[in-house]
Image (cartoon, rainbow, N blue to C red):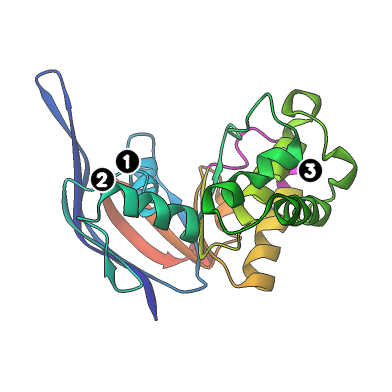
Amino acid sequence: MALIELEDVRKSYQLGQTTVEALRGISLSIDFGQYVAIMGPSGSGKTTLLNILGCLDRPSSGRYLLDGQDLTTLPAKSLAKLRNEKFGFVFQHFNLLGGASAVENVELPLIYSWLFPRRRRRELAAGELKGMGLEERAEHNPDQLSGGEQQRVAIARAAVNRPTIIVADAPTANLDAKTMREVLTLFDDLHRQHGLTIVMVTHEPGVARRAHRLLLLRDGQVVKDSTAGELG
């Protein structure tokens, strides 16, 4: 069953007198529980597509349906609420709040949802960190953590409210090989144990092979849609 449907989605930017066409008519669907990798050369539209999928940006034209709901003209406030409820985000550079502890960073999506009292938020955040092997680092600020630990905090933050979809933009790009394997195992666990849909941009074929499906972009278009096992 389709969770995400894009219909002829296009995105263009105006840079001075030049119009940059970042996406040139992408149509695709992603089912509930799929693990999708997106690859392509620099400038192919990977991050633009990911930002649209994660409701961080809007298409210039075309339609985006999430679980049957058309998001294309959804008001900004409604889109922000949906983004907090349905999505978890993991970024290449972690994007943690420097002045907040690890557990406070993980709490953020719960604070924005207004569904949990403070004590319950802290319990959920601490439990998520424990699952990431960071129980003893909960009160440390990001600058006291290694890169791998910071990324695990970011994954805990993305997963703490059990979103439907996790979107990840090159989450292993700044990690050494051992830490990269550990982080990918965490994504595998979230996918298998909780059934989360994962859409991940990566530049690394070895990372893409962990997914079930590969979308290859070039010049703002999907030029290949295949199982990740077919990756050469």
Cβ atoms at labels 2 and 1 below 8 Å apart: yes
In which quarter of the view is residue 139 placed?
top right
Mark pair 3, 1: CA separation: 29 Å
Which residue ends up furthest to the front in the rendered image? 117
Circle 1 sits on which residue? Answer: 44
Around disc 3, counting alpha carbons within 10 Å, would you say few (fewer than 14), some (14 to 19), or many (20 or more)?
Answer: few
Element class at badge 3: helix
Circle 2 sits on which residue? Answer: 220
Which is more N-terminal, label 2 or label 3? 3
Which is more N-terminal, label 1 or label 3? 1
Q: Give the range drawn in magenta.
A: 170-181
What x and y, as percent, mark residue 165? 50, 61
Circle 3 sits on which residue? Answer: 178
Around disc 2, counting alpha carbons within 10 Å, would you say few (fewer than 14), some (14 to 19), or many (20 or more)?
Answer: many
Q: Does the magenta stretch include residue 182?
A: no
Which residue ends up furthest to the left in the rendered image? 17
Around disc 1, counting alpha carbons within 10 Å, would you say few (fewer than 14), some (14 to 19), or many (20 or more)?
Answer: some
Name the residue located 54 percent from the left edge and 62 percent from the top edge: 163
Which kind of residue does numbered mark 1 sit on?
Answer: Ser
Q: Who is closer to the viewer here, 199 or 108?
A: 108
80 relative to 15, above or below: below
Mark pair 3, 2: CA separation: 33 Å
